[in-house]
Image (spheres, rainbow, N blue to C red):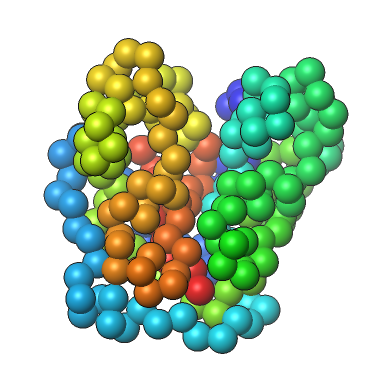
Amino acid sequence: MPNTVPSPARTRARGSLHRAIGVLSGAAALAAAVLLPAGPAAAATATPAPRSTELTVISAVNLDAYCRSVGHPNAVQNSASASGWSCNGGGPVNITSACQYQYADAVAKGIGVYEEHERSGPTGWVCQGAVNKRIDLSGGLDLSGYCHSVGLGDAYNAVHNVDGWMCGNGGAGARIDLSAACRYQNPGYAQAGYAAVHGYRDFTSWTGIGCLALA
């Protein structure tokens, strides 16, 4: 997806409840960050409460990933309107379907995931969730650590956007499931029933990805 993919202004981990997303400090953090899984104390307090209808922004949306999932190489922008996205070689993109694909783990746990048009024009789309609790997880995102855990070498970014992270020592590798990396790095929350997922505010800020726990 070109640089016109949703890129709302990045917020920081200590911002408002609805907009904060923890970010990586840079490419070096991805290769060298210390793995900080949630320990017993964190897991003990991570008990999901009953579902509410409070909405929180999870992330910008990865339309390229959704289009690949339905058999097309990437998303393309056809017009300057909010609905001006389609899959390359296919039909218009349903943004809610793209968000539900991106956060399938949250959907499987009963969390409603929807589209939200935050700003005018085609780049203003984000995914939001109907949650009772949201926790922005600290410690950075150790993608190389995740790649090593599945036997696929180091992490590298092929195209310098969020969608471009791969495992495989810089060669032909496997695309990284960013939410799977968050679950690997935060097992206490995942075991307690939270959806541990990735989040970012800018598709082109490939070092600006963090993890959050939703319930």
Q: Nearer the viewer, residue 157 or 178?
A: 178
Residue 144 visible in the picture: no
In the picture provided, is 195 more to the left or to the right than 24? right
Identify the residue at horizontal 74%, vertical 51% (top origin).
Answer: 96
Q: Position of residue 19 (x, y in %)?
A: 51, 63
In the picture provided, is 203 more to the left or to the right than 33? right
Residue 44 visible in the picture: yes
Q: Position of residue 143 (x, y in %)?
A: 29, 39
Q: Position of residue 161 (x, y in %)?
A: 47, 29
In the picture provided, is 16 more to the left or to the right than 104? left
Identify the residue at horizontal 25%, vertical 32% (top origin).
Answer: 151
Identify the residue at horizontal 63%, vertical 47% (top origin).
Answer: 101
Residue 6: which quarter of the image? top right
Q: Quadrant of the N terminus?
A: top right
**Is 195 situated above or below 96?**
below
Residue 148: which quarter of the image? top left
Number of numbered discs overlaid on the protein picture: 0
Residue 136: which quarter of the image? bottom left
